Image (cartoon, grey):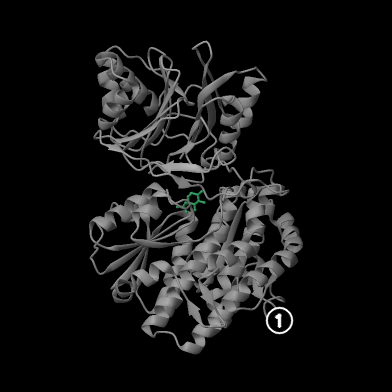
Amino acid sequence: MCGIVAYIGKQEAFPILTKGLQRLEYRGYDSAGIALRNGQGEFEMFKKKGKVADLLAHVNGKKLTANMGIGHTRWATHGPPNDVNAHPHFSGNNRLVMVHNGIIENYEALKVALEEAGHTFQSDTDTEVLVHLIEELQKRENLPLEEAVRIALSKVVGAYAIVIMDREDPDKLVGARKGSPLLVGIGDGEFFFASDGTPIVEHTRRVVYLDDEQIAVVTRDGNLQIKTIENEQLSPFVEQLDLQIESIEKDGYDYFMLKEIHEQPHTVADAMRGRINAKEGWIRLGGVEEYTNRLLQANRYIMVACGTSWHAAMLGEYLFEELARIPVEVEYASEFRYRNPILTEKDVVLGLSQSGETADTLAALQLAKERGALLYGIVNVVGSSIARLTNAGSYIHAGPEIGVASTKAFTGQVVLLTLMAMSIGYKKGTISKSYFHRLLSALEEIPAKMESLLSQCEEQVRYIAAEMKNATNALYLGRGYNFPIALEGALKLKEISYIHAEGYPAAEMKHGPIALIDKNMPVIVIATNKSAYEKIVSNIQEVKAREGRIIAVVTEGDKTISPLADYTIEIPETEEVLTPLLSVIPLQLLSYHIAVMRNCNVDQPRNLAKSVTVE
Ligand code: G6P
C-alpha cells in the first residue's frame, strides 16, 4: 500500500502534493512526508509520524516555494511507523531523494553489500537501501539518474512503485513500477506521478498507466520517455482518466463510509445499467459473451479474494451452485497461492477485488494464468493490475471507494456475481425461463428497495448502536445466503469499532460459540430466510434460552421473530437469492454508528489500509 504523488512544472508543488496526499490517505496513514527542490537547488524535507494533518502541523505554515517535489503517505511494513522511517528517504550523499510503495525482499543482502562499500543507514526501511543502491551506481559509473535507477531495479527482488528526484538535476523526475500501481499525469507544461488518479484529477485527465518493470522519465521541457528495465524504449499509451471530483469529496457526510453506504442504491443501479433488461428478458455481460463456451464448459470455478471481497466470493459460491449448477471453491488468495493448488485448463478462476491491486489476489491469479485457467476479474478500479491481468471481466462501476471498510464495492460485486450466475445458468438451462424473468424483475427493484431501507432503518439502527456500543464481543449468525453476510457484518464491526466480533453459521453456533452467550453478548441474527426459516427461529430460541441479547434482521411483516428478539430490523421482501443485497445494509450502518459513538476514525481505522499491495 502507501500512496505516492509527485510534481514537476510551473505551479507551487507544496499544495499539490499535500492535497494529493490527503486524497491518498486511504492507502495508509502511519506517516506522511514530502521533499521539495527549491529554486536555490536545495532539498527541503518534512516528514512526520501520523496523518497528513500532522505533517501540515509540523510544517507549521512555513512558506515553501518550489515547483518540483515528491510526497508519500505510508502504511508501515519495514520498521515501526515513526518520523525516521517516514518517506521520503535520502541517499547517503543527500543528492537523491525517493518515495517508495512496496517491499524490496532482498534488501538485507543489498544492505550488507552497501555497508561493506561504506554506506550507513538512518532508518529501518528497505526504501533507504534502494535509494543508496541507486546513488552507488550513479556515483560509481557516473550514470544519468534514469540509468542508475534501471540498473538498480534489475538487482531488486520484490515490489515497488518509486519516484526519485536528483538535486543536481532541476528538470527531471524518474518513476518506476513493479507490482504496485503508478501512473503519469500529463498536464500543460507539467507532469505528475501518482498511485491513482485522485491526486491529479483537477489538474489533468491525460494519464499513462505504467506497467510492471517500466520506468518513466519526465522533464520540465515536456518530454515523457518510457522504457523497460531491459532498456527497451516504448511509446507512451495515453488514456483519459475517468473520475469525477465530486466522487472523491465527502459531499456533506461526516465520513466517506457513510456516504458510500448511502450511495448504494445508485452504485447497484450502475452495476446493472445496460447489462439487464427485465422487460425484454436478457442479461448481457461483455466478458461472459466473449468466453461463453469456456465458461459453460468449465469443470469448476475457483474464486480468489481477500477481506470483504472474499465474503462476496462466498456468496458467489451459493449463487453459482444454485443458479448455474457449477461447483465452486472459494479461496483466500494468500493461502491458495502458496499451496501448489491443482488447476487445469478446464478451470475458471474469478478474482474479486475492489482495488484490483491486492497483492495476494494478483499473485493467485498470476499462478492460475501460468497453469492455463481462464481468468475473470470482478473489479472496481478501472485499469488496475487485476483488470489488466485477467482474460475477461466485469467492472462493478461503484466509483471511488475511499472509506477503508468496503461497502458499496461489496454490493457491486454481489450484483455482478448474481448477473453472471444467472446468465450462465440461463445459457446452460439450469434455471427456468420464468425464474430467470422473476429474478430480473426483482433485481431491477433492488435500488428502490435499498433507498427505502436506508431511509427507514437508520434511526432505529442508531438506537441499537447506542445500546451496543460498550459491548466487548458480538456474535453474528446467519444461514444460507445470510451466512456470508454474518461474516461481513462481523468484519465491519471489528475493523472500524475495534469490538471483537465473530460471524458463524447459525446452526454451527451450538458447537462452540454458544458457550460465550450470556446477557452481555449481543447476537445479531440475520433471519430473512425463506428456506430453513424454522431452523433459524430455533437458533434464535437457543440464544434466548442463554439470555443473549438478540438483534434480528427480518423480512418486513415477520411476526414470529419479533416477540423473541430484543430488537428487530425489517428489510423489504425480495427473492431469497437477492436478500444479501438488502440484509447487509443495516449491518453496515450498525458498525458505522457504533464506531462513531466510540469516537473511532471510521474512514481510517488503526493499522488497516484500503489497498493492500504487500503480502
Ligand atoms: C483491505 C481492505 C478491505 C478489503 C481488502 C481486499 O484489507 O481494508 O476493505 O476488503 O483489503 O481488498 P480488495 O481491493 O482486493 O477488494
Nearer the observer, 607 or 293: 293
Q: How many marks?
A: 1
Circle 1 residues within 10 Å: few <14, some 14–19, many ≥20 = few
Q: Amino acid at mark 1?
A: Lys
Quadrant (top left/top right/bottom left/bottom right) for the N terminus = top left
Disc 1: which residue: 559
Quick check: 514 above or below 109? below
Quick check: 446 above or below 100? below
Quick check: 150 above or below 545? above
Residue 231 seen in this snapshot? yes
Question: Which image quadrant for residue 171?
Answer: top left
Residue 521 seen in this snapshot? no
Tell me: 170 left or right of 407. Answer: left
Residue 483, x across and y down, in percent: 51, 68
Quick check: 411 above or below 187? below
Nearer the observer, 545 or 610: 610
Tell me: 230 left or right of 587. Answer: left
Q: Secondary structure at mark 1?
A: loop
Residue 502, x across and y down, in percent: 53, 58
Residue 576, x across and y down, in percent: 55, 78
Pointer 1 residue Cβ closer than 8 Å to ligand 1: no
Question: Which image quadrant for residue 306?
Answer: bottom left
The structure residue drawn at horizontal position 74% and vertical position 67%, both measured from the top left corner, is 456
Residue 100, x across and y down, in percent: 42, 31
Tell me: 256 left or right of 356. Answer: right
The structure residue drawn at horizontal position 64% and vertical position 59%, both measured from the top left corner, is 263
Quadrant (top left/top right/bottom left/bottom right) for the C terminus = top left
